[in-house]
Amino acid sequence: MSRIAATFDRLRGEHRQALVPFVVAGDPDLATTGQAVGALARAGADMIELGVPFSDPVADGPINQRAYQRALAGGVTVRDVIELVGQARPAVPVVLLSYYNPIVQYGVGRFCADAARHGVDGVVIPDLPADEADELVAAARPVGLDTIFLLAPTSTDTRIRVVAGRSSGFIYGVSVTGVTGVRDRLPEEIRELVGRIKKLTRLPVCVGFGVSTPDQARRVAEIADGVIVGSALVALLEQPGDKVARLEQFVRELRKAIDAVGARGAGPS
Amino acid sequence: MASVTQKGRFGKYGGRYVPETLIPALDELEQEYERYRQDRLFQEELAYYLQRYCGRPTPLYFAERLTDMLGGARIYLKREDLLHTGAHKINNTMGQVLLAQRMGKGRVIAETGAGQHGVATATAAAMFGLACDVYMGAEDMVRQELNVFRMRLLGARVIPVESGSRTLKDAINEALRDWVTNVRTTFYVIGSVVGPHPYPSMVRDFQSVIGREVRTQSTAEIERLPDYLVACVGGGSNAMGLFYPFKDDPEVKMVGVEAGGLGVSTGHHAATLVAGTPGVLHGAFSYLLQDGAGQISSTHSVSAGLDYPGVGPEHSYFKETGRAKYVAVSDRDALQGFRLLSQTEGIIPALEPAHAIAYLRTLVPTLSRDHVVVVGLSGRGDKDVQHVSRIVQSSNEALSSP
């Protein structure tokens, strides 16, 4: 069983939902990300999602775009991010989020092998639909790297079956038709999507895109197995001052809000 | 489960590398396009507008003075510059906007580089009564301010893109983000043979009217097919439209001319097929200009319409199979081509096809007068006159300064 699957098993037993914070590796530099990884784990993250910078992130809103640009200005590459994970080796699972081209150029097979060897547990590729992922899945399975695909409010039941058939670890539910970013309110359609996914697969579902406040995190935790918070954290790293301390404090608040749901949530089924 | 992995592939190139949110929309587009492709009424309506509104068929014109001057093969120009809005782009936008209307979408969006595709989309949207938003790099808005004004006159909203290199690549990123957000109500009119399946095939089909006409016209005029087809390649829609109907005629050679910028060896260019490597950008696996880590390079060309780090996947396939050959022409040579056609034929070409004209100086003298070369004159140069006059002024100043 992968570390990600084991994490969801444990959470299910504890009637808790996963908190998955996201930051961009190398924003503003790799040393800060190294500290951030430790702080996120201390603050109660169940998994950490690290973004690999890319020049043309079409699924991302302005906050993450700026973070990728800051990381690219420092010359951060796929290799740097994998090595960062190898050095940090946090106690919780690590998922890399990367657009497909940096992985293609690194070599899909080599990427999976190197990532797994350095302690990466899973990969999310926002511009690689499950039915284009033969090569990735074939390379990831033997080395125990989970392949996490996305589903969106526009996804049909046919798509849910295709994605579930290729996914391991968990499924990434996109809360909105749109790009990543901070939002005042979350659409109702996410409840419907999670419900449809749950009917067709036993894989855990984590919801992201736009989850920005402890209150929103709590509401997502009521319907899903996990909550992914990205842009709201990335925005904290843009501000001057003690970025890592701010990050840790905010993740503690998210943790508290999610744990208030507990067994009341629909949660893991 | 049926594998759909081979969907929209040209050899290993193409595919659909987009966020999951868009997959159902691409499935729907593929089905609707397949349906209307075979729908007689749709095709008749499109043909009607292409003829009566856009001005098709365009002439195949024998450029006699240019032929005499270059002293080799006979040169014919396929006069897409004479179309309504001044470029081949309208062939595609009439097709896509008509399809959007049939699919019940009330709003179209587009990206634009030189502004020609934006103008052509705004024109079709005005004619069919649809709302239109055009994404354009802030840098390109300065280079092509006349087209910005034209789009606004036509009722479109032009949205400046300030991210990245502020050119065509970033305009496509922003249009994709808009489409992901508004996919249920919006049709994305892509301007070239790029993007996720089915766009490269669909845009090729709409542009293939160029090559089909050339087949008919050359058969009538010279009683055979041409020996060479030459066209500029940015994303590659005008070249693919010219080439595709001849792809199974091995005696017809094809040359795509890319933007060599300041010179391919300088790194400041947009010669994707000449100097790039395969990768994934904007929904397709195709040749790209990128660094070793897979970050997309910034490009340079005097011509905003060619200033793009990607290229249509079917061109990558033609390169790989050798069906077409791809070369690069520098900014400097393209400016000479611009002047050459203006002064020998009284036709001011757009800077994009000026690259193809410039390549004739290399190709034509190696051939005899028995040979026939057809050049895709994809657009007229009105939009570039101001830009070129600035370049000429500043280079004169540079020459006269001590």
Image (cartoon, coloured by chain):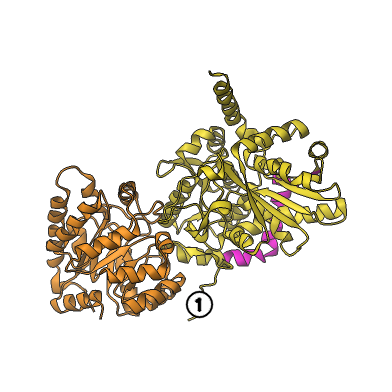
Chain colours: A orange, B yellow
* Residue B209 appears in the rendering: no
For numbered disc 1, what is the local secondary structure? loop
Subunit of mark 1?
Answer: B
- The quadrant where residue B165 appears: top left
Q: Looking at the rendering, in which quadrant would you find the C terminus of chain A?
A: bottom left
- The quadrant where residue A253 appears: bottom left
Which residue range is magenta in the image?
B32-61
* Residue B43 appears in the rendering: yes
Q: Main secondary structure of the magenta part?
A: helix
Q: Where is residue B355 in the image (x, y as percent from the top left)?
A: 65, 42
Left or right for B292, reference B92 = left
Front residue of A253/B125: it is A253
Crowd tier of the residue under label 1, counting other residues whose Cα lies within 10 Å: few below 14, some 14–19, many 20 or above:
few
Q: Where is residue B249 in the image (x, y as percent from the top left)?
A: 76, 63
Kind of residue at badge 1: Ser
- Is residue A148 depicted above or below B179 in this figure? below
Left or right for A265, reference B281 = left
Q: Looking at the rendering, in which quadrant would you find the N terminus of chain A?
A: bottom left
Question: What residue do we see at 55% from left, 60% from top?
Answer: B103
Q: Label 1: which residue? A: B3
- The quadrant where residue B252 appears: bottom right
Left or right for A212, reference B140 = left
Q: Position of residue B398 (x, y in %)?
A: 54, 23
Residue B150 magenta: no
Front residue of B293/B206: it is B293
- Is residue A118 depicted above or below B399 in this figure? below
Q: Position of residue B229 (x, y in %)?
A: 73, 52
Residue B55 magenta: yes
Question: What residue do we see at 30% from left, 71% from top?
Answer: A116
- Is residue A159 depicted above or below A58 in this figure? below
- Is residue B361 depicted above or below B49 in this figure? above
Question: What residue do we see at 48% from left, 56% from top?
Answer: B282
